Amino acid sequence: MLIDGYNLLRAIENFSEHPEPITDVQLCMVLSRYLLRVKKKGTIVFDGTGPRDKVIFRNIRNLEVIFSGTSHEADDIIEKLILENTAPKRLVVVSSDRRVKAAAKKRRATSISSLDFWEEVIKQLEKKRRKPEPRQKFSGISEFETDLWLKEFGLKKDT
């Protein structure tokens, strides 16, 4: 998965009538949770140099964070990554930018608009996770518990 960072941030701002500002770090944290939930990995590319201290971005699981720097735009980096991808038919590109979508289409990668992707992220993260089944369901109750129940129902006498 390849994500146009600021394009997605702009889509999120337009997502609701009263948007709460979201930072690039917060976005990456949410995307990390999403990617872990759907068992995928991704790369997000932002324009510019980003914050001076990028340590927080190194600790984000399943998401590589790239800043384009001062001499390139994020779109340049994204196009390059699309071209270099060895399995473009399995690549999902998230952007509403025409240039990025065209680059994805040219390599036959799947392209999804930022807004549609964000709706999917929200939907996945709002789903309740199933609680694991109790151990006893698979192994049964212990011999001690069995004796207690048998005594409770009068099927076994106290010894």
Image: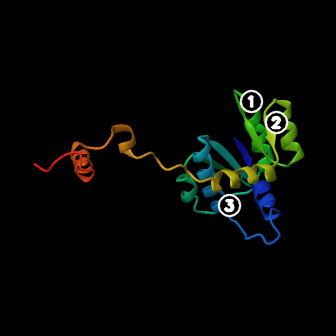
* Disc 1 to disc 3, C-alpha distance: 26 Å
Splitting the image into 4 quarters, where does residue 109 fall? top right
Identify residue type, mark 2: Ala
Whole-percent x, y for residue 18 in the image: 79, 72
Query: Residue type at mark 3?
Result: Asp
Q: Residue at x 69, y 27 (%)?
A: 86
CA distance for labels 1 and 2: 8 Å
Up-down: is 90 above or below 12? Answer: above
* Residue 20 position in % (x across, y down): 73, 71
Q: Which numbered marker is on residue 24?
A: 3
Badge 1: few (under 14), some or many (20 or more) residues near its Cα, within 10 Å? Answer: some
Of marks 3 and 2, which one's residue comes earlier in the chain? 3
Q: CA distance from mark 3 to mark 2?
A: 23 Å
Q: Residue at x 76, y 37 (%)?
A: 80
Q: Which residue of the protein is positioned furthest toward the front in this rendering?
A: 154
Alpha-carbon neighbours of circle 3 within 10 Å: few (<14), some, or many (≥20)?
A: some
As helix, strand or loop, the secondary structure at mark 3 comes to: helix
Viewer-proximal residue among 145 and 153: 153
Q: Are marks 3 and 2 in contact (CB under 8 Å)?
A: no
| Marks 1 & 3, CB-CB < 8 Å contact | no
Q: Is residue 79 above or below residue 50?
A: above
Residue that mark 1 sits on: 88
Residue designated by label 2: 104
Element carrying mark 1: helix
Choose the circle earlier in sequence order: 1 or 2: 1
Taking 7 as reference, is 62 left or right? Answer: left
Q: Earlier in the sequence, mark 1 or mark 3?
A: 3
The picture quadrant where one finds residue 92 is: top right
